[in-house]
Structure formats: C-alpha cells, structure tokens
Amino acid sequence: MELAGAASVGDIVAIADGEPVVVAPQVLRTLRNVHQQAEEVSRSTPVYGRTTGVGANRSTTVERDREHGLRLLRSHAVDAGPSVPEREIRAMLGVRLNQLCHPGSGIDPDILEALARMLNEDALPTIRRFGSIGTGDLTALASTALTLIGERPATRPLTRMAPWGADSALPFLSSSALTLGQACLVASQLQQLARAAEVIYAFSFTALGGNPSSWSPEAAAAAGSPSAAAVATRLRAALLPLTTPPRRIQDPFGLRVFSLTHGEVIAAIERLDGQLTSLLQRAQENPLFGVQQVVHHGAFYQAGLGLSLDATNAALAQASTNTFARIRMSHEPSQTGQPAFLAGPPAGASGTMMVEYVAASTIAEIRNAAEPASTGTLSLSRGAEEDAPFTAQSLKQLQRTARAQEVLLSCELVVAIRLLRIEGLIPALRPQMSLAYRAVAHLPDELTDRDLREDLDLAGASLSQLSFESGPAGGPRCR
C-alpha cells in the first residue's frame, strides 16, 4: 500500500492485518523541504519543544542539541500495565505514518521510511496499556521512537536509526495515533457486528412470527430517521413476502423497534468512521510549520473523538436491551408455544436457560462501559493542560462493549436457530435467509441438556459471515 496521507479506516485495518506499506516518493520530497523550512524558522522564532521545554516547562529556553531530543524521548516513554496487542500497535504505526505524510510537523522524513520498515519487517515496539489520555499518546510514541533508535528492543531484529534531535522528537510524539488506530479497529469490528445483527434479527423475527408492519415504508417514514429507514428497507428486501402469517397484531418492543434502535447504532458507527477518516488525514502536530511561520495550537485536543466514542457506546447500550428482549421472548411459552427455554425432554430440562444468563452478563458489561468518559477531565503538568479529556478511556470502554456485543449476538443467534429448527421453519425460509442459514447450519441441533459453550463459540465464529449486501440486481441479499 502506498501512503500519501489519504488512508481510510479500512486501510488502517489492512495495515494492522499485515499489509506492507511504502511512502509515496513525492511525499518524501515535500517533507524534506518542510523540514528545512522548519529548521530556518526555529533559528529565529521560539518553537515549543524545539527551543523550549514541554508542558509546564514551555517557557524554559533549552539548547537546541541532540541531547534535548533524546531527553524528551526517554522521559516520555513511561507506560505501565499489560502489553497492547501487536495488531493494535500495527494500527498505531499505520496511523502515525499516514499522518506524517502531511507536511506540517517539520519532522525528518527519514523517520517515515524507518516506520515503514518497522511495519514491513513486523519488528514492533512493546507498548503498555496505561499512559494515554486525550491530548496525545505520548508514552506509546516515545516508546516507538526509542525502539527505532535501538534503546528498546523490537519484537524482531530491526536496523536502528541514529539518535534523533529536537527537530523530530516532539513532532513525532504529538499525535493520538494509538487511540486512533485502536478506534479504527473497533469501528471496523462494530460495522461487521452491525451487519450480522440485522441477519440475526431476521432469524429471530421469522422464528417468533413477527409482524412486518413495524418496518413498513409508512412506519419508516414516521420514524423520521434515515438510518432507521435504511434498516427497514434491508429487512423488507430480505424477508418479504413472509412465508407464514404474523402471530400478533402488535409485537413486543424486542421485535417492533429494532429498525429504530439498530438504526441509531448504524448512524453512530458511521459518524465515528467519518470522524476517524478526517483525523487520519490531517496534520495535528503542535506546533505546525508553514512557509516561514510556526503555529502553536490545540487541534490535537480529541474532545470530538471522545464524544463520538461515547455516543457509539450509548447507542449500543440502548440496542442491547432490545436484543436481550428477543432472547427472553424466545424462552417464553406464551410467545412461542414451545417449552420454556426451548428445552428438549425430559420435563423440567433447562434448554438454553443459561444462554440467557450469559446474555445478561454482557448487558451488564455494555451498560457499565456506556458511562460517558468524556465528562471527566484532569489538570496535568502543573496546569499546562488544565482540562485534559479522557478520550483514550472512551476508546477502551468501546473496546469492552464490542467484545460483549459479539457474545450477546452469539447468544441471540444460538437461541434463534434453535427456535427456527423446533418450529420446522428452515425449509420455509426466504431465499435470502436460506443463504444466510448456510453460514450457521453447522451449529449443533441436539436439544437435550448439554454444555452449550461450543455452540456460543461456533456462533461467534460465524458472525463475520452474516450480512445483507447489494446483489447483482441492486437489492440486498444475504451471504
């Protein structure tokens, strides 16, 4: 993949999964010119981090030598806790490399080529979990810099760079690349889970004999939500005409409001994706260099990203209750006409009772993670950052939600497939749903009480294969 500053969320996911990278030659030529201009400006103008200390030391003039840059890197490479997974580190490196393709940092362009080598050789730094806030992932990037110059070991042999000077130390640190990279990965995961959620709802809807009027064109228009209308359109294409008549005049909320709650999930994920794309494609280093000028600013303050992460969490928390309602409804004989908990013989068997308990535990996790982190701040560095946001915490909470959401959807899938089979509805599925069923047909069909851990694991592994997508004729289909 050739990088020139225009990487998308999908590109960062590809880099995280091993896609090799190269920096566009014209980018390196431009950066060399900007690097020289930054050097000239710094000789006559006070520049934060180059001619001064940082944080509360920003008013202290320092010698512009190589040792100042090394002191910054060494002092800022402090993190703690468990190690960040290598896939997330690769995402961070991809984000930082793409950002640095934009002129403005004044950084030595040799660093971009070294970052590309680090990715292509999969010789990664070790990053620990605690150290980031919402004004920059300083500790993670300082650790990366020390790895590039050989002061910390990489996961594989890596040709070390010469020590960096003040011209590159602070500019390299001035980024939320770890948070952005992790957010790209979780946004991609949530997009896939959202696609799977629609198919799983369609399974539950069919098994429970739902009434399609709740996602009719008239109902979608009344909702006043474009995202809810899009969900309703996909459901109509996949499920109509129904092979069996509805069982109820008006369904419980678990079936009736899916397009509304899920539509808000879709809208939140799309907003997050758009914001991430915008942040990936901007120079946000402080300060920024232009033609014969330097600009000190606060554009790196990730308040907007934190709010988008929190909003996505909130949307998923609201929708999760709707998902749980369908599981509970499937276990209720008055709704299904089947034994409680879809149990097989003998009388009093537990069936999928404990799947409901597992689902409930995911609801607790999702609700806890949905507590907005962006409402909290702290004052750091003797007040130099007097209102630092907790954007990195918002990201960690969304990661927790995504993991729990995957299990919750697995629970609904296991229950919905069992009910479809008990009702004998598999042969009557619409063609689109029959295609989707093939992806989960391997789920065990034994109804006697047994260990259901494997069922949930198999269901979870199937989620990536479930989605509505545009077919040759332009209408949605399942795969």
Image (tube, rainbow, N blue to C red):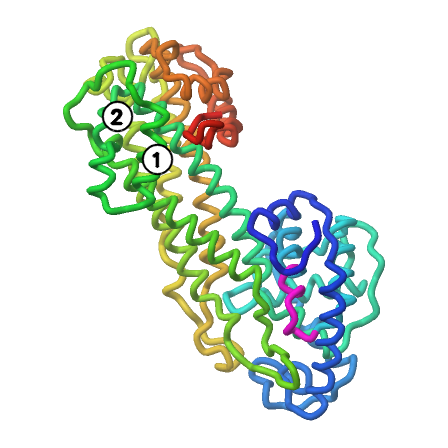
Answer yes or no: is residue 227 visible.
yes
In the image, what residue type sits under mark 1? Ala
Q: Residue at x 40, y 13 (%)?
A: 449
Q: Secondary structure at mark 1?
A: helix
Q: Nearer the viewer, mark 1 or mark 2?
A: 2
Residue 335 or 110: which is nearer the viewer?
110
Q: Main secondary structure of the magenta part?
A: loop
Q: Which residues are magenta?
A: 98-106
Query: CA gap, disc 1 to disc 2?
Result: 14 Å
| Residue 44: image location, x then y, percent | 69, 93
Going by the image, does 346 lie left or right of 124?
left
In the image, what residue type sits under mark 2? Met
Q: Is residue 208 above or below residue 144?
A: above
Q: Is residue 252 above or below residue 110?
A: above
Instruction: State yes or no: discs 1 and 2 in contact (Cβ < 8 Å).
Output: no
Residue 325 or 439: which is nearer the viewer?
439
Mark 1 highlights which residue? 360
Mark 2 highlights which residue? 329
Q: Quadrant of residue 51?
A: bottom right
Q: Residue at x 64, y 59 (%)?
A: 98
Going by the image, does 332 lie left or right of 14?
left
Q: Is residue 238 magenta?
A: no
> For the view shown, which residue lies furthest in the top direction?
346
Please state the total of marks drawn on the protein image. Answer: 2
Answer yes or no: is residue 83 visible.
no
